[in-house]
């Protein structure tokens, strides 16, 4: 066992027992000061609330970034597994949801900033 709790020691260069993707942040490193070249890599990434670049990546993608001179900080490991079927939206339920939203829009008057005010009908 390691000194970090109940995690077993791993020899350098061995893969984890199960396939995972890592929640990581990417930072400029010694060899790569500019983050713009990351646009050329096909990473699932978004800026986080602190302005850092957060990505969900494989061990191989981490290794590639390290070889390019970036600093990669790993925050969590997420096991790669099939998506729970209960979380998958069906075409029928998506269509139903869209139709409900569109019906709501049709019933409401246009209140956008550039919309003309509704005119009252004159008697007479």
Image (spheres, rainbow, N blue to C red):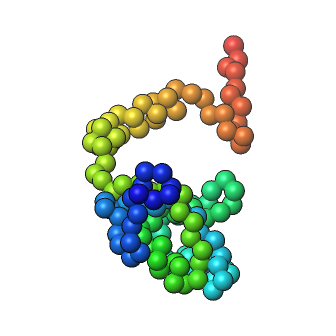
Q: Is residue 60 visible to the viewer in this orientation of the structure?
A: no
Q: In the rendered image of this protein, does residue 22 appear above or below residue 105?
A: below
Residue 107 drawn above or below residue 62: above
Quarter of the rendering occupied by the C terminus? top right
Report whether residue 68 is seen.
yes
Residue at (30% x, 38% y) in the render: 86
Q: Answer above or below: position of 95 versus 61.
A: above
Q: Which quadrant holds residue 57?
A: bottom left
What residue lies at 71% left-to-right and 31% top-to-bottom?
A: 117
Q: Nearer the viewer, residue 120 or 53?
A: 53
Residue shown at 41% from the left, 75% from the top:
12
- Marker count (numbered): 0
The residue positioned 53% from the left and 79% from the top of the image is 66
Point out residue 31 in the picture as x, y percentages from the top left corner: 63, 86
Residue toward you, 22 or 114: 22
Question: Where the N terminus falls, by quadrant?
Answer: bottom left
Q: Nearer the viewer, residue 54 or 67?
A: 67
Q: Which one is nearer the viewer's eye here, 92 or 87?
A: 87
Locate residue 94: give its quadrant. Answer: top left
In percent of width and height, residue 42 lies at 46, 73
Residue 106: percent from left, percent from top? 50, 31
| Residue extending furthest toward the top | 123
Which percent across, then down, holds residue 123? 69, 13
């Amino acid at each position: 066992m390691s000194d970090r709790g109940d995690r077993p020691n791993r020899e350098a260069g061995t893969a984890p027992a199960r396939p995972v993707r890592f929640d990581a942040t990417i930072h400029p490193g010694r060899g790569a000061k500019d983050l713009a070249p990351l646009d050329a890599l096909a990473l699932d990434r978004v800026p986080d609330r602190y302005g850092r670049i957060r990505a969900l990546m494989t061990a191989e993608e981490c290794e590639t970034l390290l070889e390019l001179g970036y600093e990669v900080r790993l925050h969590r490991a997420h096991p790669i597994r099939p998506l729970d079927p209960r979380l998958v939206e069906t075409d029928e339920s998506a269509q139903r949801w869209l139709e409900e939203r569109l019906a709501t829009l049709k019933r409401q008057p246009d209140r956008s900033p550039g919309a003309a005010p509704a005119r009252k009908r004159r008697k007479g």
